[in-house]
Image (tube, rainbow, N blue to C red):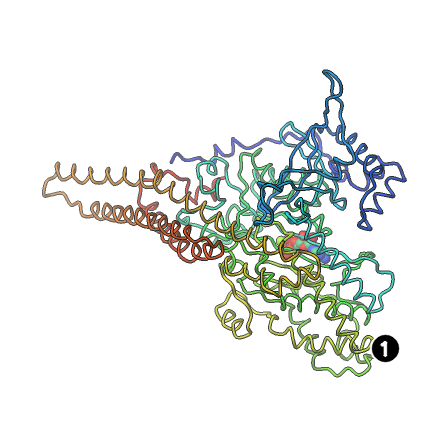
């Protein structure tokens, strides 16, 4: 393969012409129709009605919707928008948008820019080509999109085209959920109800609302676009299905937090500029562990907004990369034997006074409240560890979870020594009246602010308490974070309700005493899920088994947790997903697993047959000819045994590649004959995946034998180090 040299790569560098420096504060959010803009552009009364509708979860009356739509259109036209689109999050995992022009015919040969309240509030896209898990037949394929007023509309620029995007939910004609957003919003509502009830029970005053916050840390790879387009596995499946490890990988630990290359810095700058315009508070950026791997972490936001923003971050990473002649890879494991990419999702709860409910308290009352929410969360994770695992199950993430760089498939909770000690005091302590003295005795009168240093040392835990939030680390880098978030929200809502019932059952005369009595039992109950040790060890796997914790290593088996009675009841009770909706989601995920795997099988097949084997056969021919020619010239004096050895090795590898590939095709066909999707997924995972790994080993061995000039694919060392 013709090499791209670093000089060529540098020459191609996208040049940013900065005329003058503009502080971010001067343009932050300028491409969003946010509160500030609404206040500025809307009549006072309309603004008030809109805010009421947003805050109280009400629908907007037609007249108000018309006024808002008009103001939004005027604003969008000023920004250069020609079209508007309902922007939604179907089950494909990415976002969807259908553009309509503002321009509308009005009389012969004339148009006028129009945008009505109805067009703002509701859309009717054809839903037949989105995954629905059999929820509805094609003849009733119409879907509805409805404006999610809690998330601001924004301007999306793409080349010279500019579109007003309206965040919406997406439901079927019959009212069933077809997207990731609707159940998230429902889970936010459920959690709000349960958390406010709990706070009231604990005696908190003036708390009317509680919301979840999410702070996603997005990891990604960047490689030169030239290499990217020469690899159909990367273009079509997002992951290299073959490729020998480079002579140097990440063993020198010289990438993590290393100084950022100029080309990458410029790229990051451009990405952030786009994000700032969209009102996304991009904060942290750095080199990650693997070569060519990076991270971007915006400041946490309310769950609903954070989900939309993370989708936009992923889109922007890809979009800006193209401008820089780079490709952003969001796959969980683009390169085998090199660290993969995850997305730590930081989760916490705030009330309407901006108090973080997971902040250890300064007063005994605060401390009690903190302990209740902390234990309720841990308890929820323990009770529904299987569902939480299912929420991050995907074909891509299977390559990463448990690969000694990411948490294992076993869900456990890390609390750190300090909190573990406090819980153990409560468990052992005798609380009679929960007086101040007793609370002091338990060591929680004023909880020490748990410093990040104390809680953040264990990076191997899938669900770690890190000072004032939980960090869920098993999420895959390409995933929509709505899925794990809605599971956490719903299960914590249930846990809070169950704890509230138990507290009430003890009598609410001395509420603190009742709380402690309940917590004491709960601490005993949740013990098996608590683990402060190294999650990457074999010993933990054995220990977790003894504790009865689930350890589902593959997506087909992990997903089953979505359709247990326990899961169906949980999501139905909190009106997050009906049984039909949840079952359909299960099927969508199973089907997706099958499709992802089959796409890779097809890539592997074409790459082997049309690129790898032809290159190897050429080299085989060359070697054979060299041997014959040498013997011709030198006669019996020719020592050609080394050449013969190489030739033999190549011959064997070619044969192994051909037969293993054939075997894979046969196994896929056999799985295809099963008319049961979950069984098919299991069979593909169990029978085909190991064969794909085996095939890869032959190809990678061949890569290290065949003439570098004729090898048809960019190699790992080039993709990961030339940029
Ligand atoms: P690290 O890599 O050390 O874990 P980062 O700074 O990369 O930390 O990311 C931490 C993430 O957690 C950020 O997105 C941050 O905004 C978020 N975060 C901080 N406090 C909270 C909180 N109370 N609730 C939710 N997320 C939070
Ligand atoms: Mg980070």
Q: Which residue is mark 1?
A: 509
Q: Closest to the observer: 186 or 304? A: 186
Residue 26's place in the image compared with 539, above or below, is above
Rendered location of residue 672, percent (x, y): 42, 50
Residue 561's place in the image compared with 655, above or below, is below
Residue 499 sits in which quadrant?
bottom right
Mark 1 is surrounded, within 10 Å at the Cα level, by few (under 14), some (14 to 19) or many (20 or more) other residues, namely: few
Report the label total: 1
Residue 143's place in the image compared with 474, above or below, is above
Rendered location of residue 74, percent (x, y): 79, 29
Residue plotted at (65% across, 45% down):
172
Q: Closest to the observer: 669 or 606? A: 669
User: Mark 1: which secondary structure?
Assistant: loop
Q: Looking at this rendering, what residue extends furthest in the left direction?
A: 636
Quadrant of the frame with the N terminus: top left
Residue plotted at (37% across, 38% down):
712
Rendered location of residue 445, percent (x, y): 79, 74
Rendered location of residue 508, percent (x, y): 83, 75
Q: Looking at this rendering, what residue extends furthest in the top direction?
A: 109
Q: Closest to the observer: 638 or 185? A: 185
């Amino acid at each position: 393969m013709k090499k791209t040299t670093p000089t060529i790569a540098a020459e191609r560098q996208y040049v940013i012409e900065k005329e003058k420096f503009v502080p971010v504060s001067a343009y932050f959010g300028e491409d969003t129709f946010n509160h500030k803009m609404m206040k500025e552009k809307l009549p006072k009364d309309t603004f008030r009605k809109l805010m009421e509708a947003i805050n109280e979860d009400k629908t907007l009356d037609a007249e108000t919707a018309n006024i808002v739509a008009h103001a939004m259109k005027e604003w969008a036209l000023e920004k250069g928008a020609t079209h508007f689109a309902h922007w939604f999050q179907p089950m494909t995992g990415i976002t969807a948008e259908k553009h309509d022009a503002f321009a509308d015919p009005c009389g012969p040969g004339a148009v006028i820019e129009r945008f009505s309240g109805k067009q703002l509030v509701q859309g009717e896209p054809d839903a037949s080509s989105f995954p629905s898990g059999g929820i509805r037949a094609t003849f009733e394929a119409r879907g509805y999109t409805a404006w999610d007023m809690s998330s601001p509309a924004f301007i999306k620029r793409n080349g010279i085209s500019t579109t007003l995007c309206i965040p919406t939910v997406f439901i079927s004609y019959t009212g069933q959920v077809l997207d990731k957003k609707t159940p998230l919003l429902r889970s936010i509502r459920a959690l709000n109800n349960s958390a406010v009830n709990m706070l009231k029970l604990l005696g908190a005053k003036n708390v009317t609302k509680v919301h979840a916050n999410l702070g996603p840390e997005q990891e990604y790879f960047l490689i030169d676009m030239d290499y990217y387009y020469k690899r159909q596995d990367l273009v079509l499946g997002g992951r290299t299905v073959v490729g020998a490890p480079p002579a140097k990988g990440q063993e020198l630990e010289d990438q993590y937090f290393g100084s950022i290359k100029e080309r990458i810095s410029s790229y990051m700058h451009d990405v952030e500029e786009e994000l700032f315009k969209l009102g996304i508070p991009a904060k942290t950026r750095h080199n990650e562990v693997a070569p060519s791997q990076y991270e971007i972490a915006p400041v946490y936001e309310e769950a609903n907004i954070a989900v939309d923003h993370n989708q936009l971050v992923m889109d922007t990473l890809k979009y800006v990369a193209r401008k820089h002649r780079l490709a952003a890879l969001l796959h969980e494991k683009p390169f085998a034997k090199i660290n993969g990419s995850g997305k730590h999702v930081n989760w916490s709860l705030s009330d309407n006074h901006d108090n973080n409910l997971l902040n250890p308290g300064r007063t005994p009352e605060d401390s009690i409240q903190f302990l209740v929410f902390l234990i309720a969360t841990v308890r929820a994770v323990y009770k529904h560890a299987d569902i939480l695992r299912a929420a991050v199950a995907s074909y891509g993430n299977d390559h990463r979870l448990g690969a000694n760089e990411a948490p294992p498939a076993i869900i456990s909770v890390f609390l750190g020594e300090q909190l573990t000690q406090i819980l153990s005091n409560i468990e052992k302590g005798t609380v009679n009246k929960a007086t101040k003295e007793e609370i002091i005795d338990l060591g929680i009168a004023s909880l020490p602010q748990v410093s990040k240093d104390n809680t953040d040392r264990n990076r191997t835990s899938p669900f770690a308490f890190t000072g004032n939030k939980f960090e869920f680390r098993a999420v895959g880098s390409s995933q929509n974070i709505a899925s794990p978030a809605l599971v956490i929200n719903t299960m914590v809502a249930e846990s809070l309700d169950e704890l509230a019932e138990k507290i009430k059952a003890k009598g609410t005369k001395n509420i603190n005493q009742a709380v402690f009595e309940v917590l004491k039992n709960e601490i005993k109950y949740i013990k098996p899920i608590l683990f402060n040790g190294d999650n990457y060890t074999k010993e933990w796997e054995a220990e977790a088994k003894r504790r009865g914790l689930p350890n589902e290593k593959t997506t087909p088996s992990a997903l089953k947790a979505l359709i247990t009675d326990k899961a169906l009841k949980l999501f139905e009770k909190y009106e997050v997903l009906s049984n039909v909706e949840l079952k359909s989601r299960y099927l969508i995920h199973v089907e997706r697993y099958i499709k992802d795997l089959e796409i890779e099988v097809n890539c592997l097949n074409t790459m082997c047959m049309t690129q790898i084997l032809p290159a190897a056969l050429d080299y085989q021919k060359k070697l054979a000819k060299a041997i014959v020619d040498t013997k011709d010239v030198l006669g019996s004096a020719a020592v050609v045994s080394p050449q013969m050895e190489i030739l033999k090795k190549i011959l064997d590898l070619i044969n192994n590649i051909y037969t293993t590939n054939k075997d894979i095709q046969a196994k896929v066909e056999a799985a295809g004959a099963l008319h049961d999707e979950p069984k098919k997924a299991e069979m593909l995972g169990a029978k085909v995946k190991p064969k794909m790994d085996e095939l890869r080993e032959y190809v990678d061995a061949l890569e290290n034998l065949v003439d570098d000039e004729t090898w048809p694919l960019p190699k790992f060392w080039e993709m990961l180090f030339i940029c």
